[in-house]
Image (spheres, coloured by chain):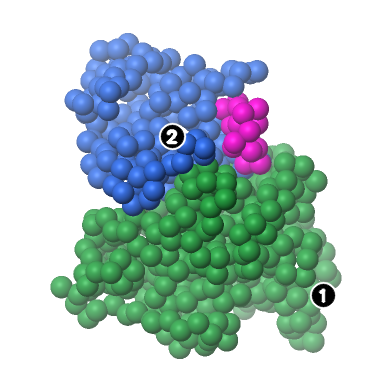
Amino acid sequence: MGMTITEKILASHSGKDKVVPGENVWIDVDVLMTHDVTGPGTISIFRKEFGADAKIWDRNKVVVIPDHYIFTEDQHAKRNVVFLRDFVKDQQIENFYDVGTPDYKGVCHVALPEEGYTRPGEVLFGTDSHTCTAGAFGEFATGIGNTDAAFILGTGKLWVKVPQTMRFVFNGKLPDYLMAKDLILRIIGDIGVDGASYAAMEFAGEAVHSLNIEERMTLCNMVIEAGGKNGVIAPDEETERYVKARSNKPYKPVQNDSDAKFASELKYDASKIVPLVAKPHSPENVEAAEKLSDVKVDRVYIGSCTGGKLVDFQAAAKILNGRKTAVDTFIVPATTDVEKGLEKEKIGGKTLLQIFKEAGCRIGHASCGACLGGPEDTFGRINGEEICVSTTNRNFPGRMGSKKGQVYLASPLTAAATALTGKITDPRKYLA
Amino acid sequence: MSQNKITGTVYVVGDNVDTDQIIPAKHLVYDTHSPEERKLYGKYAMSGVPEDKSGLPKGGVKFVKEGEFESEFPIIVGGKNFGCGSSREHAPLALQIAGVKAVIAQTYARIFYRNSVDGGFLKPLESVENIFKSFSTGDKVEIELDANKITNKTTGKTFELRPLGDAADIINAGGLFAYARKIGMIKPKAEANV
């Protein structure tokens, strides 16, 4: 019996010819990423367990990207970044994107590919659940806690249980009113927030491979919202093009064996899917946007690792161009590269930034922002009973701040259409 | 394991309790190794659970009383997919600091389970059935680890738990580092670092 992409990567990184789902293996790590919220705890455990003077296993394989609580006056949050700085200096880690310097990037999951740390066939761990985003590059990528990360810092290894692979195939062409967010919400709505617990989720089919890399990242980003361990998309020319432009490190792309065994396969006709929204307070609470047209909202938030990439703002700008928003609309680019892109990318002679400003949007700086609430002075944070349509990935109670708030998850197209009317709006209204 | 029984009063929650409910994101800034700040994770443990779901079936029960740092409930019973959401290890840590000895849920989100086991914070036990509706917050319960059983002493009903399986070796060693030392994968900890 052959192996899936995930199984092959785990086999090659554990020195085995073959692994099977359910087996526990120790694997070698290619890249470990950490940030300002989970980094300090990881570092403390590393020092406690390996000694105050211990050196990390490989300073070139550790990437430190502060991104969560950046534009805040919260003193504890600021101290976290100082903690990272000390450690990075101490360990001579060069892959550090410090706050307040030209190196500053923003959201780690978007920064990692931009800076060339994501490659097909590799193993990436990060102290953040959305590390699974990088599965879009045909690698094994998953989120871990501080103890596991501290263990990797000292040894370069971690144990994993080989997951079974669930396959999701989107056949046909993706209509222009749909985005990757609609596809992943369709899946989560169908299988539930624990529908892929412990499993790898592979995305395949014509509609998936027609997506650019940033959109593929949106698909893999939200596997954790179905309980998945990792997402994966077979690397193709688009993957190679993106990776080769950013990394000169050799890598070995991995494909499924023709007789690979999948735990399940769900097939969709992409052309039959409609713009979707996940209602409060769960990503599985999925409904067609057009059926929620009487839901009034107080604000729209476009940002985060899953909804704040350049492709997301291009989509939003297409709808907002030449129009005025009816409610507070927050634009938060994931990274400084995206931020620069807003000033460069144009639609009909106007930059995206101009379009957003003319539409009356409020523009923030690159970071995780209000996606996870954060300190109370965070840009766009829900501090009261606001109802928000957001391009982020979670709408659990209190996720964007106050427990009294309500978050509806949607694609940037749907979010932008909603910003224009103040009610949940199917983007087809503006794309005709 | 020397300790075979865990007893105490239970705090009951439902399905899909995520890590933002266990410890809201704005609290993830306290230094986990400062004794003073560490206590704050206990103070705010489970503070993100919506009011009507805080301590089922009635709701409205604070997990940690106002002004306290530890909970009166050493055992939590939940439903499906406990600990879903973020990878924050602060979640099982906050429960441990609040005095939680065991969580019983039908299923766990993968990262929370892993963090609980590898960090040695608490025992994430799995019930065979979804049992949270058979418990009321404040009921007295007894968990028998060897027998894989939980008994609601208030109602007299007993429910089956799943064996720990693969995770038992790491749980019984006390976490990932202790386990790796036991199997000789990493060096024993220098006395000075304890």
Residue B84 position, x and y percent, is 45, 45
Q: Chain of mark 2?
A: B
Three-letter amino acid code at disc 1? Answer: Gln
Residue A407 position, x and y percent, is 60, 49
Is A270 on the left or on the right of A370, as rendered?
left
| Residue B44 lies in the magenta-colored region | no
Residue wearing tag 2: B121
| Vertical position of residue A258 compared to residue B143: above or below | below
Q: Secondary structure at mark 2?
A: loop
Tell me where the magenta segment starts and ends, as one range.
Answer: B27-43
Q: Give the residue at x 38% y 65%.
A: A28
Q: Between residues A258 and A346, which one lies in front from this camera angle? A: A258
Residue B32 position, x and y percent, is 59, 37
Question: Where is the N terminus of chain B found, in terms of image quarters?
Answer: top left
Q: Give the residue at x 40% y 20%.
A: B10
Residue wearing tag 1: A354
| Residue B28 lies in the magenta-colored region | yes
Is A363 on the left or on the right of B122, as rendered?
right
Colour assigned to chain B in the rendering is blue
